[in-house]
Every structure is written in structure tokens, then in C-alpha cells.
């Protein structure tokens, strides 16, 4: 990875989902603009806030997809990440920082 780039693997699929009440939501259902969670699998040398293994929140509309060894990944700039969820952030906090 070069500069401030972050390589992430998306957590969920694009298929059908379940609500917290257990209702199945089909993949064809329209929904508003949502941010997506992903796991960082590679970071560039100039990335300051993210380490490999962190979960990051990003806008799936502003992404560059890449395929490596038959697996799909997303390439982001560090500034395109909206939040990081990591245990190392604060021991008494929510684990999120924006």
C-alpha cells in the first residue's frame, strides 16, 4: 500500500438482510444512502489512525474496488473513512472515534 491508502474487505454481502426483529429484507428493497462497515487488511505508511484489523465505516458510493487472488477488496483514502471501531481506542468508551 502506498501513501494514505487503506485496503478493506467488506463485512456483509449485498444479499438479503434481517432486521433486529428477525424480518427478512430482500436484496431488491430500496433503501436510503447507508454507510458500510469493513475490516482493514492493509494500510499505507502515511496512515495515522487505522491499523490492520480495525473496523472502519465508509461511504460505499465513494470507493474503488479491486480483486486480489479472487477476493474482492475496496481501496480507500484515509480521509474517506468516517469512523474507526477498535478496542485500542479507549478502554472506558464506546470503541468508536470520529
Image (tube, helix red, strand yellow):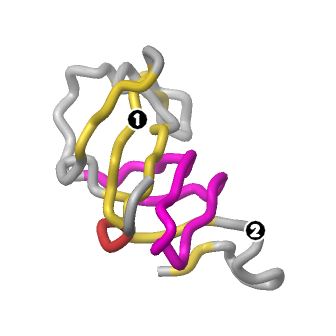
Q: Residue at x 38, y 67 (%)?
A: 3
Provide the residue designation for mark 1. 73
| Residue farthest right in this picture | 91
Let me know if residue 45 is in the magenta part: yes
Q: Residue at x 48, y 38 (%)?
A: 9
Let me know if residue 78 is in the magenta part: no
Count of all numbered marks drawn on residues in the image: 2
Where's residue 6, x and y in %? 43, 56
- In magenta, the rendered stretch is 34-57
Relative placement, left or right, of 96 versus 17 is right
Q: Is residue 86 above or below residue 12?
A: below
Which one is in front in this view, the residue at disc 1 or the one at disc 2? Answer: 1
Relative placement, left or right, of 7 versus 65 is right
Where's residue 46, x and y in %? 46, 74
The image quadrant that residue 31 belongs to is top left
Sequence-wise, the earlier of marks 1 and 2 is 1
Nearest the viewer among 58 and 23 is: 58
What label sits on residue 87 in the rendered view? 2
Where's residue 75, x and y in %? 34, 48
Nearest the viewer among 83 and 1 is: 1
Nearest the viewer among 1 and 34 is: 1
| Residue farthest top in this picture | 70
Where's residue 68, x and y in %? 42, 25
Relative placement, left or right, of 38 versus 72 is right
Secondary structure category for the residue under label 2 = loop
Q: Is residue 9 above or below residue 55?
A: above
Q: Is residue 11 above or below residue 86?
A: above
Q: Residue at x 46, y 70 (%)?
A: 83
Amino acid at each position: 500500500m502506498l501513501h494514505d491508502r487503506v485496503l478493506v474487505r467488506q463485512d456483509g454481502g449485498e444479499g438479503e438482510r434481517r432486521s433486529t426483529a428477525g424480518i427478512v429484507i430482500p436484496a431488491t428493497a430500496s433503501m436510503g444512502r447507508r454507510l458500510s462497515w469493513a475490516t482493514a487488511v492493509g494500510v499505507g505508511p502515511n496512515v495515522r489512525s487505522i491499523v490492520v484489523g480495525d473496523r472502519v465505516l465508509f461511504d460505499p458510493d465513494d470507493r474503488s474496488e479491486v480483486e486480489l487472488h479472487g477476493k474482492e477488496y475496496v481501496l480507500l483514502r484515509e480521509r474517506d473513512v468516517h469512523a474507526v471501531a477498535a478496542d485500542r481506542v479507549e478502554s472506558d468508551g464506546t470503541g468508536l472515534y470520529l
